Image (cartoon, coloured by chain):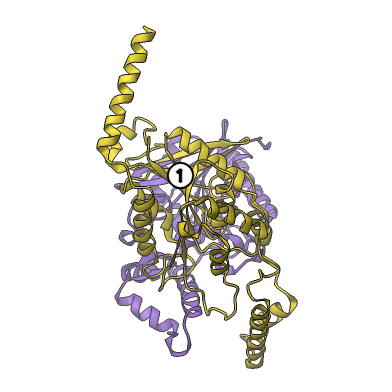
Chain colours: A purple, B yellow
């Protein structure tokens, strides 16, 4: 696969369930495959944005058309965050995977999720959508993701308080179980918190090696190390645009291998 | 995929070979005709920049909330990603400190200035008020000093010092403070020494002051550029930290055009507590004083005049 000079990037809105999903298509004139990039949860979106866009451009430069988007009620998409649930965001993934697939049904479709996005992509893949699945920093359930965000919110909150004014984590959790809580600028509802425990990864696979999900296609789970920490802010990082060349190359090679294998099986 | 929806549109501005991507929030009283094309003539536009390296939506999507609100109040609003940030083309440095160096030396000012010019022309605006947060505020000050289209500034937690790598003492303390009580006491002594050093220095600028930015600021203050500054409480404020606002207020003769508002109960992101609403309320008041939205009747009559002129030109050409 050659490296193209520049991809064709189109940003716009796709209408779904009464909202407009902000999407950016990293178009390719003669694509070999398409990938749907399912990004991380709410506030994490902002901190992983630079490397996430670079990954989309990296793929497009290698003839893999990439579509990235904002969850309903988050970022540039319309919708009210507090009205959303994990099933709303699950529907978004299905809708966008369909949209991408209909652009040229014969091309393979890869789902790639980061953090909560990995959970969403897995659910859709488990339902038979897509030809391969890439998972970066996949949690076991959505509460893992929410808890990291909550702990960060508490750390900032504590920085402004002294002694007894500082409440333990359990107090925040207790409050969240009965009333909404504003976390990093988003209004988390008790419903979202409760649902997060039940929204679980449908896969059983190890880290950093290939696993197969119900014979649907190859799956690559990747645990991100500290060199890729900018993608998941919870890991803590100092650089805003780290050199992720190795991560990108390795994942691209895996995708390339999965596509070759698929073509071989079909012929 | 649609490039525009009822209230928003994705727009692109080309600057020196790269595409800058942004969102345009239309004045909602005028939606039916704005769908036909740029027609925000004689309005003041609001131009939002990235807060630091974050995408144009900002923390908790606050910039979207503010831009939509200003558009409803009659100010067409634009949120753009600077080169290498968000959806725009370009690159940014690997390390945060190198990005801060670019910001602090005015690297983004020519781009922002070109952006202000391009938007003003394309949407027939009177000019733009730039909304800059943190590093965005620094870029906004540099750009305003070099632009005729920037008519005002809304700055959230601007800073006037240069970023420096932490000293070895500070790094050591930062490592040990959470671990040992003694290190906590040493950290207090360190802060106290810093306080006395600043006290002895009186109103002299600290060594790490961003002198070229302060020069730009003084130039803008002398020119009477309407400016509103918002500050948020800092976590455990340190005594003796240099008070740049007091210093700038004493030094500049045009400070009557500068309004400073401190918002309690929020933090640097301005999304915690009532920060988001307080910012909106104060900025709308300030806008209506400095840049009152033009009554529709005025615009309609000037539209009518323009359409008469257009008809006259068409007749003359036929």
Q: Which residue is most to the right?
A: B168
Residue A124 at x, y = what percent?
Answer: 43, 53
Quadrant including the C terminus of chain B = top left
**Residue sitting nearer the eye, A201 or B56:** B56
What residue is drawn where x is 29% and y is 76%? Answer: A178
Q: Report the number of discs.
A: 1
Q: Which residue is most to the top?
A: B318
- According to the image, label 1 marks what residue? B128
**Residue sitting nearer the eye, B124 or A52:** B124
Quadrant including the N terminus of chain B = top left
Q: Chain of mark 1?
A: B
Q: Is residue A135 above or below residue B23?
A: below
Name the quadrant containing residue A219. Answer: bottom right
Residue B315 at x, y = what percent?
Answer: 33, 10
Visible residue check, residue A104 = no
Visible residue check, residue A62 = yes
Dot 1 alpha-carbon crowd within 10 angstroms: few under 14, some 14 to 19, many 20 or more: many
């Amino acid at each position: 696969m050659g490296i193209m000079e520049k991809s064709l990037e189109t940003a716009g809105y796709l209408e779904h369930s009464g909202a407009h999903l902000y999407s950016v298509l990293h178009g390719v004139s003669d694509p070999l495959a398409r990938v749907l990039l399912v990004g991380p949860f709410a506030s994490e979106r902002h901190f992983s944005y630079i490397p996430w866009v670079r990954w989309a451009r990296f793929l497009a430069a290698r003839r893999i058309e990439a579509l990235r988007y904002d969850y309903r009620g988050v970022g540039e998409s319309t919708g009210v965050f507090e009205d959303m649930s994990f099933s709303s965001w699950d529907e978004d993934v299905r809708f966008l995977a369909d949209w991408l697939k209909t652009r040229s049904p014969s091309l393979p479709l890869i789902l790639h999720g980061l953090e909560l996005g990995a959970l969403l992509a897995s659910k859709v893949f488990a339902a038979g959508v897509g030809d391969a699945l890439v998972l970066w920093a996949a949690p076991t359930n959505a509460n893992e993701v929410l808890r990291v965000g909550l702990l960060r919110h508490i750390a900032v909150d504590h920085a402004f308080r002294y002694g007894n004014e500082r409440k333990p984590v359990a107090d925040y959790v207790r409050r969240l179980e009965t009333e909404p809580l504003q976390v990093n600028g988003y209004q988390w509802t008790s419903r979202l918190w409760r649902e997060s425990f039940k929204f679980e990864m449908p896969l059983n696979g190890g880290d950093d090696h290939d696993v197969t999900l119900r014979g649907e296609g190859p799956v690559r789970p990747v645990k991100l190390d500290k060199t890729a920490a900018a993608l998941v802010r919870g890991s803590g990082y100092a650089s805003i645009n780290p050199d992720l060349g190795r991560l990108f190359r390795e994942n691209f090679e895996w995708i390339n291998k999965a596509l070759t294998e698929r073509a071989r099986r079909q012929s | 995929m649609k490039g525009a929806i009822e209230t928003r549109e994705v727009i692109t501005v080309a600057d020196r070979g790269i595409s800058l991507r942004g969102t345009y929030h239309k004045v909602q009283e005028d939606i039916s005709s704005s769908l036909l094309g740029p027609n925000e003539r004689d309005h003041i536009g609001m131009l939002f920049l990235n807060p630091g390296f974050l995408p144009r939506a900002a923390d908790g999507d606050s910039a979207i909330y503010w831009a939509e609100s200003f558009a409803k109040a009659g100010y067409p609003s634009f949120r753009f990603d600077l080169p290498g940030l968000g959806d725009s083309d370009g690159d940014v440095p690997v390390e945060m400190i190198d990005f801060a160096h670019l910001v602090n030396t005015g690297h983004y000012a020519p781009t922002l200035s070109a952006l202000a010019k391009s938007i003003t022309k394309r949407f027939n605006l009177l000019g733009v008020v730039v909304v800059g947060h943190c590093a965005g505020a620094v870029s906004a000050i540099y750009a305003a000093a070099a632009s005729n289209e920037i008519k005002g500034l809304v700055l959230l937690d601007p800073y006037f010092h240069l970023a420096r790598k932490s000293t070895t003492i500070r790094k050591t303390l930062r490592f040990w403070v959470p671990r040992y009580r003694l290190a906590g006491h040493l950290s207090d002594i360190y802060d106290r020494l810093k306080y006395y050093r600043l006290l002895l220095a009186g109103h002299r600028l600290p060594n790490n002051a961003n002198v070229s930015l302060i020069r730009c600021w003084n130039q803008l203050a002398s020119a009477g550029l309407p400016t509103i500054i918002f500050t948020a409480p800092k976590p455990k404020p340190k005594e003796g930290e240099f008070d740049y606002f007091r210093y700038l207020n004493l030094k500049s003769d045009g400070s009557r055009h500068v309004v400073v508002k401190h918002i309690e109960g929020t933090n640097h992101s301005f999304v915690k507590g009532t920060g988001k609403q307080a910012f909106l309320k104060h900025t709308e008041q300030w806008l209506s004083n400095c840049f009152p939205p033009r009554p529709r009747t005025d615009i309609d009559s000037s539209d009518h005049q323009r359409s008469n002129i257009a008809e006259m030109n068409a007749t003359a050409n036929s």
